[in-house]
Structure formats: C-alpha cells, structure tokens
Amino acid sequence: MNTRQQFLAKNGRAQVSVEGQIPVSLQRLLFGNDGSDDGKQLDADRLAERYQACMKKAMCAMSIGGRYLALAYESRFMLLEWSQAEGLGECQLVSLGNDAAMADETITALYCMDIYTPQPQRRGAGSVCVVVGYSSGYMRVFSAYGHLLTAHQFHPQPLIRIRLRMPLPDTSRQRMTAVESEEMNLTFQDGTMVSVDGRSLYLALRLCLSEAADDSAGPMFQYKKWAFDLHTPRVSDAASFGPAMRDPLAQLAKHEHTSSPHVAEATARFLVAPCHGEAAFGVFATSEDATAEASAVVVAGKMAARVTGAVLSMAKSYFRRSTALSESGQSTPSRTDAGTRVPCVLAVRDSPRKVLSIALSPEPYALAALTDSLGRVMVVDLESCEVVDMLKGLRGSQCAWMEGTECDKAQCVYVVVYAARRGAVEVYGVGAEGQLQASVSVGQGWTLVQGPTQPLGGSLVVETAGSERRATQPVPATCVLLGDNGRIARISA
C-alpha cells in the first residue's frame, strides 16, 4: 500500500499522518542478516517480527524539518533521506557506518545535526552531520556521506545524550549575556557533562568539510567539563539550560518567584535526574566558570562541501590562536579529568518518584517536560524552577514539543505525549492553556522523535547590506513518530 494513512482527533484539533516508509532492504542493512540464531533462513513473517523487535531498540534522530533521519542499532548507524513525494514517501540511503573501535563498543546516543551553510543552493546532505555517542565515551562526528570528521573521548563513561543548546533569537536579545554562545551538551552515564562551544565546533567542522584544514596546525574547538555533586553513580538524564537572565526587570521578577536565589545569579544551570537516592530530580547551578579546554580535530576523507573565503579565513585565524595558547603552557586535562564541581541548589524529593527523561522546549519558552516512574509528566518552568503542570495517567510515555502555526506564537507551544500503553498521541497546552487539546489513537509500537529548530552555527552574526543579523531564525518545533514496522508519521495541530 503506497497511500498515506491519517489518524484524526475527535475534536479535529490534531492529526497524525503516515507519510513515509523505511524499506525492508534498508532495515536489513541496519539490523543484520536474515538468519536466526541456529543459522536457518527466516521466513517473511518471522523476519518481520525480528525487524520489529530490532526497530523498538533502535535509536532515531531527525534533521530540521525531517528531511533526513539517522538510525542506530548496536554498533551500526545509517543516514536516510525522506522523500517528500506524493503518497507514501520511501526513505533512501545516504550513508551507512560502523565505526566501533572495540568489539563490545555500542552506540548509546545519536543526534542528526544541521550545519549552517551560507550558500542556500548547497544546503543538502552536505550540510548535515551525524553525531554518534558510544558506550566507551567516544563522540564521533560523521559527514552525511559517512566520512569521519572528528573523534574524541571526553570521559570514559557511556555517552547517553547529545543536545544542541542555542542562545535566544534576536527578538529576545535583551535576555542574553554578552558571552552566551550555542553549545553541544554531552551527558555521560555517571552524571558528568561536557559542553562543547558551538561556534568553535562549527568552524572546526566547516574546516573539515572544506578539505582545507592543515594537519600541521590541527583545528581546535573549546569545551568545558562539569561534574554534578551527586550521591549516586548514575543518572537517567541531564540537560543544560544556560545562564540566568540578564535583563534587570526580568531578574527582579525572578528574584520574587524563584525557589532559590542561587539560580538567579548562576552562569550555568542544569536539570539532573539521578537514578538513585531520594530526589526525583534536581537543579544544579554555579556562578563559577569552568576552564575551557581544547580538543584536536581529526580531518578524514575528501569532502564535497566548501566554505566561503571569509569563513575559512576566520576559522584559520581562530584555530591558530587556539593552538598558540595551548603551546604557550595552557594545560589540557586528560580524558579522566573530573571536571568543575556543580552543587545542587534545589532538589525535588518525592520518593519513590524518579524522573526518567527530560525534554527541553524550544529556547524562547524556557520549559521542560519530565517523564517519571509513576506515570506522570511534569512541566517545569526553568526560570522559576517550579513545576507548573502535572499530567497524569501516562505511564511509559514519551515526550516532545511542537509549535502551532495558526495562533499567536507566544501561546502555541504544546507538549506532545505518546502514551505507549494506550497507543495514543496526546497534545497538551501550556500555562493558561494547560489542558488536553487533542487525543489521537494511533496504536502501539511507535517512538516519538523530536526535531531540532536551529542548525549548528545558526547564531552567528552575518552582515548584509550594511546591517547585522543572526544567520538563521528558529523554525517551529516539530516531531514525528517512527513505527516498529518502519512507518514514519508527522504530527500536526
């Protein structure tokens, strides 16, 4: 069947439309051979069951708008291009990789990252990278065509989450600090977090993709390492939500409403979900700045993309300065360096409740949706550090965020919840609209995938016609469903 299938909410305010399919041939490439454990060839039905079981364990990430999908299973990963043709668009293979360095090394985190490209005509697969985290602690970044761009082991623990945090857009510039930059945040299983400076990483990757990096003066990017003051050896999730606001009026209001005065003065704030202990989750904050360290970037393969002369010149100048600083005596810690200690300033204790996952809203809204072990979804205001909503009856659920397109943008951000046990997608408003907006029955066997809203390098300032502007503006947040049968569905409200 090559036709689209639609699921509609009874009130008509949301719909889920099946618009894509991952062919069985590509599933075979990702999940392995067609044989069973005893070596016998599986028939079609048993093979479909095997692929369904593998798809449930696979990780998925999408690019902006969902044009590209990255899938990972065990030590393999692939990048697919999702055809937007009429009917049921089939995914086509862009690249397939298996770069595990050790026999027991598996993929534990995945991110499909768009990279800002000044030339619009070149914004295709060449402007997409796949960021892969491994059980060894390695982060490896691959081009869309599978070429290894950089590899680094920041910490010898499994890397469980990769996020890109962007500064606020121009419309909220008064809330930004002068030094705030985009950053890639890497969360490790023991609670350590590494924040890679996004702009230096952008320039490093553009150099790698441009085929112009000089091995004798290896490109560098800056990162900071954080260690949370935990009494548990593991975390379920952790997320950085940046420095406190710097707008004086906003700060005055926050001093009156925040649960902790330490948060109001913080230069770095984190939401952490420990696996053990009494706390369901905690807010960690510090006003001290971690030391920025440098990491060598490995250039590999011949790349098709090119950067403009201005960007390349700026990149070369930046990396030469970084190399000079490193050679002048600035020490670089080993991969086992513990990192800057960050204290807990606020803990929510509600035993036996434990937060299982954290989903951050698009940047302007400063919200987070937290799933927990008691079947609830908590919506947390990251500025006041207060739980502003509690959604019940959602055991085993998954969360994402979506923005509407037909209403005032300040009021049309929604929490999207896939209630796996009930097989329903539920869309909730936030704040005054904090109630169920729509419920769509889609059945079981789906995974909810959040799409990014901005590319790496999107916060760079570019000059056009004598005026400065941000390189890109955020696109509305979207999310899709990936079925265990390979179907891909868009959610709209």
Image (spheres, helix red, strand yellow):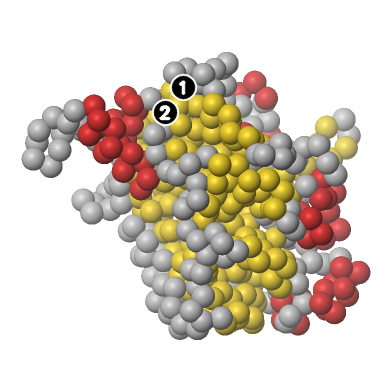
Q: Is residue 264 left or right of residue 297?
A: right
Residue 295 picture location, percent across and down: 48, 56
- Residue highlighted by disc 2: 22
Residue 365 picture location, percent across and down: 75, 56
Q: Is residue 139 left or right of residue 398?
A: left
Q: Earlier in the sequence, mark 2 or mark 1?
A: 2
Closer to us: 441 or 49: 441
Residue at 51 percent across and 69 percent down: it is: 374
Closer to us: 44 or 175: 44
Residue 431 picture location, percent across and down: 78, 60
In the rendering, which numbered label is found on residue 441? none
- Residue highlighted by disc 1: 90
Disc 2 residue type (three-letter): Ile
Q: Is residue 173 above or below residue 228?
A: above
Label 2 to label 1: alpha-carbon separation: 6 Å
Label 1 residue SS: strand
Disc 2 and disc 1 in contact, CB within 8 angstroms: yes
Q: Is residue 125 above or below residue 363?
A: above
Disc 1 residue type (three-letter): Glu
Residue at 21 percent across and 51 percent down: it is: 103
Q: Is residue 262 above or below residue 122?
A: below
Residue at 51 percent across and 19 percent down: it is: 3
